[in-house]
Image: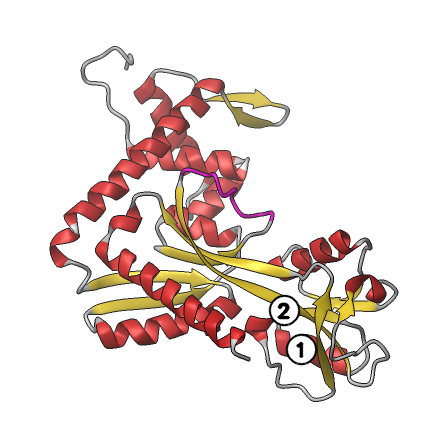
Amino acid sequence: MSTLSRDFTIDLRRLRVLRMLEQRGTVSAAAAALHLTPSAVSQQIAGLARETGVQLLEKRGRGVRLTSRARLLLEHAAVIEQQLQAARADLATWDAGQAGQVSVASLSTGISAIVAPALKSLCHSHPGLSLTVEEAEPPGLFTMLDLGDVDVAVTVHHRPSPPSTDPRYHRVDLLVDPLDAVLPAGHLLADPAGVRLIDLAGERWVAGYPGGSCAQLTDAVCTNAGFTADVRHHVGDWVALGALVAAGAGVALVPRLAQPLPVDGLAVVPVLGSPASRHFYAAVRAGSQNDPAIALVLDGLRSAADDWTASTCTL
């Protein structure tokens, strides 16, 4: 069909498939993210090409890449998606957020310190509002948000996440979570007054799984301090990390949100110089922040984050 035709239409579901192909890079990866077969993804892209009357993909080696016209189409798709979210929010205004379902995905520490307190408060103030919570990390967390599997993502700024200027998302800053150095009790550098990270440059380190937000944060903070951390051990649990540190396997950085660790034999000391921290925020699909139920959840998350910040300031 020609773009000049009065009957020109586009299947929005096919636009979402094209956007996922751009994000994932290959048909097979896009198919996995969308829970479709590669053949189904190819058929959706072919159907979109027929609808628009333009070539959307071109060969690149053994794979494919989006044409410039496909990328132009996706720029318009982002605007259309935002308007659809705004329409959805307008249709929901009659309920004023007093009833509905909102799903939240978050890092584990965000759940314990921000999401869970917000859920408790909202269940008391708005009993008709139902919240579901799932633990997740970026970039998978944002894929869930893009697909509509969750309504709100609570995460921290780090490299795999979309940039703060990405127009597809509305963001709400929540809190700054300082990082402390955790050393074995009795360590020569375990000074309650604090320690400079550069003084720990010669130590062995314990960190999160490679590629995860915690491991990347450790790498970035140590690099900023002027050294590359000699990470010997990788774990996915803060208690396990503490146990390794207490056993003398290394030192680590632990956020305040994960403390206190229920492990004996640890010395937790502040970082001197340029304090290390991670910045929590909530993200929703652009336009959906006007949905009354989602707006209530965002307010609840902000309030819970403010309470946590106030409690740490009084310690």
Position of residue 77 measured from the top left corner of the image (x, y, whole percent): 35, 31
**What label sits on residue 59 in the rendered view?**
none
- For the C terminus, the image quarter is bottom right
**What label sits on residue 236 in the rendered view?**
2
Whether residue 254 is visible: yes
Q: Examine the structure image and report whether residue 230 is included in the region drawn in magenta.
A: no
Q: Name the kind of residue labelled 1 in the image.
A: Ala
Q: CA distance from mark 2 to mark 1?
A: 8 Å
Of the pair 100 and 21, the residue shown nearer to us: 100
Q: Examine the structure image and report whether residue 161 is included in the region drawn in magenta.
A: yes
Q: Name the kind of residue labelled 2 in the image.
A: Gly
Farthest residue in the bottom direction? 264
Residue 213 falls in image quadrant? bottom right
Residue at (42, 48) in percent of width and height:
35
Position of residue 293 measured from the top left corner of the image (x, y, whole percent): 24, 59
Position of residue 170 measured from the top left corner of the image (x, y, whole percent): 38, 46
Q: Is residue 183 above or below residue 90?
A: below
**Is residue 206 toward the left or the right of residue 157 in the image?**
right
**Circle 1 sits on which residue?**
240
Of the pair 305 and 163, the residue shown nearer to us: 305
Position of residue 296 measured from the top left corner of the image (x, y, whole percent): 27, 61
Farthest residue in the left direction? 94
Q: Are the residues flagged by discs 2 and 1 in contact, CB closer than 8 Å?
A: yes
Q: Label 1 neighbourhood size at 10 Å, few (<14), some (14-19), many (20+)?
A: some
- For the N terminus, the image quarter is top left
Magenta residues? 159-167
